[in-house]
Amino acid sequence: LGRAMESLESVTASVVKTKGRSTAAVTALLKYIRTHKLRESKLVVQYGKPLVQGGGGSALGDEKWTVLEQVFIAALDTKDMDLADACLRGLHTQFPDSARVKRLVGMKSEAERDYTAALQIYDELLEANPANQLAMKRKICILRADNKVQSAIHELNEYIKRFQADASAWQELADLYLSVAKYDSAAFCYEELILHNPMSHLLHCRLGEIYYTLGKENLTVARKHFCKSLELKRKDNPRALHGLRSCCSALASGEERLADPSVNAALSAYAARDLRDMYQATADPVLAGALETVLESDSATAPGGTLSAE
């Protein structure tokens, strides 16, 4: 993403150099934003609006309709409804019976907070084609925006039955479950996400946090995922280190012996050592002092001092 943004500055500079008068330069900018899936709505409206309203779209050929759709969505983001209407009129004239254009009408209703009208449009699209993936997603977005979490969860589960390989859907469902404290269901979603991307240290860390929240027999599983996160990203991963330290502390202070005390103590010492090194090297002295207080507190509460930070 960083490299994409750097290149975007270069492409934008070419447009600025021509003061936005070069159709070729503006088209290249809009295409770059689409190709790299960047959410640069203000930039799209700034340079796409004159292209759409000034008649420059005729020089785009078949790409005109893609640009109109792109500018339309950016106009909704920036609340430029007049521009959105102009784009929609052009698309509807060219494609009067298009399901894609009808979905854009639904999105405009969403932007105007007319959720009833938008839902009616998406229901009609789904009645005509039950496998219309984008219409299903828009419907879920409306339910979430309208704070109908349980309905959104239901619809998202129905969506996943049809599109099980959609990682973004699993992520969204996990977030919804977390918002209503259904941690066991959220953990299942993150297990699926890890199947999609097993080398993501962030996913392992997040799943570790969820299992840690569930507690008790889940603590050893949480510890495993924090360790995996640290294996995948050894440096600059304080969140996983804090999670590992917390897991070890919870396991050591529990009445039941859920983990080997020697292994637990070694992992706790490892996490404490790396946290100290990281905070002393980069953190404000006040934060480093706060860390020492936390580590000493954990050591004091561990039975028999088994969670010594040293």
Image (cartoon, helix red, strand yellow):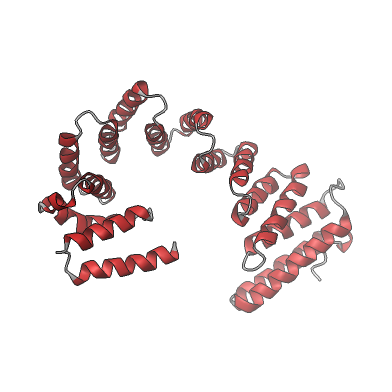
Is residue 179 visible in this depiction of the protein? yes
Quarter of the picture containing the C terminus is bottom right
Residue 15 screen position, x and y as percent = 22, 66
Residue 178 screen position, x and y as percent = 56, 42
The residue lying at 29 percent from left, 49 percent from top is 77
Q: Residue furthest left?
A: 54
Residue 215 lies left or right of residue 162; in this view the side is right
Residue 104 screen position, x and y as percent = 27, 37
Residue 296 lies left or right of residue 140; in this view the side is right
Does 55 appear above or below 146? below
Residue 19 lies left or right of residue 120; in this view the side is left
Is residue 292 visible in this depiction of the protein? no
Residue 59 screen position, x and y as percent = 14, 53
Most foreground residue, 297 or 226: 226
Does 85 appear above or below 204? above
Quadrant of the rendered image containing residue 43: bottom left
Quadrant of the rendered image containing residue 81: top left
